[in-house]
């Protein structure tokens, strides 16, 4: 892929795209044919490098909630929540691809945390949360959503980075998801 193709597909600015490609080259995360097209991408290492700079809880406003009837009730509430912009990430997003262990913590991006909490019957808590609701500065998490069984999920790459940077056992789940992604590239890459 050429850098101009990447600019067109990503919608990023020309200057930013060239700077990122040069950075990725210096880090040996992409290979180019001279100054020409990108011919090799170390996508797993790129995602792991991304997780050094980005964190689900560091890079977003995140509130902790309890879904009193558990994660299945949360998922059913999301299926019925007409007009609520959301994207599931973390364990629930990974579990649909690479079941590692039963999901105990839901992580979900929304546009409006108060609206989501009210519509999903979530209770704000300081401890014992089973739902983390995030509101980000950028809409990129809503790009390339995957619909499955009536629910919307972030792209597998976003789910992996969110897991790698999440609480508790989620980093181990992130590594499991990356392992699955390596074995099943055709199933998730566009």
Image: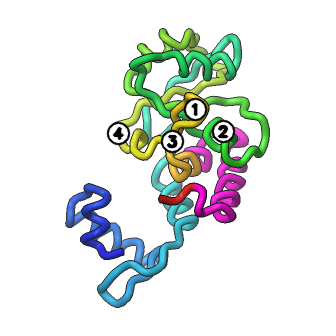
Disc 3 versus disc 1: nearer the observer: 3
Of the image marks 3 and 1, the number of the one nearer the N terminus: 1
Task: Count residues near mark 4 (Cα–Cα under 10 Å), then give few for <14, some for 14-19, many for 20+.
Answer: few
Q: Secondary structure at mark 1?
A: strand
Q: Is 163 within the magenta?
A: yes
Magenta-highlighted residues = 162-187
Q: Say which mark, if any, is on residue 139.
A: 4
| First in sequence: mark 3 vs mark 2 | 2
Can residue 154 be found in the magenta stretch? no
Taking 136 as reference, is 173 above or below it?
Answer: below
Identify the residue position indicated by label 3 in the image: 146
Give the structural element (helix, strand or loop) at label 3.
Answer: strand
Residue shown at the point (68%, 11%) measured from the top left: 68
The mark that comes first in sequence, 3 or 4, is 4
Say which residue appears at 41% left-offset and 72% top-offset: 24
Determine which residue is flagged by label 2: 91
Picture coordinates of residue 104 (x, y %)?
A: 72, 30
**Which residue is disc 1 drawn over?**
107
Residue 8 higher or lower than 72, as above or below: below
Please tell me which residue is depicted at 61% across the width and 18% down the height of the picture.
76
Residue 131 in the image: x percent, y percent? 61, 24
Mark-to-mark CA distance, 1 and 2? 7 Å
Identify the mark nearer the N-term, 1 or 4.
1
Label 4 residue SS: helix
- Where residue 23 sits, quadrant-wise, is bottom left
Spatial CA span between label 2 and label 4: 21 Å
Relative to the observer, which residue lies in front, 173 or 94? Answer: 94
């Amino acid at each position: 892929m050429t850098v101009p193709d990447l600019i067109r597909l990503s919608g990023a600015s020309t200057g930013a795209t060239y700077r990122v490609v040069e950075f990725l080259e210096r880090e040996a995360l992409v290979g180019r044919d001279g100054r020409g097209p990108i011919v090799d991408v170390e996508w797993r290492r790129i995602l792991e490098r991304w997780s050094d700079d980005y964190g689900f809880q560091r890079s977003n406003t995140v509130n902790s909630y309890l879904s009193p009837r558990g994660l299945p009730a949360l998922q059913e509430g999301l299926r019925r929540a007409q007009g609520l912009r959301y994207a599931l990430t973390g364990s629930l997003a990974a579990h649909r691809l690479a079941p590692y262990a039963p999901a105990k913590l839901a992580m979900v991006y929304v546009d409006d945390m108060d609206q989501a909490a009210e519509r999903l019957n979530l209770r704000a808590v300081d401890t014992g949360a089973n739902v983390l609701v995030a509101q980000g500065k950028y809409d990129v998490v809503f790009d390339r959503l995957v619909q499955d069984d009536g629910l919307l999920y972030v792209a597998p790459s976003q789910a992996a980075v969110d897991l790698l940077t999440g609480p508790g056992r989620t980093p181990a789940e992130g590594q499991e998801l990356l392992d699955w992604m390596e074995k099943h590239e055709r199933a998730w890459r566009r």
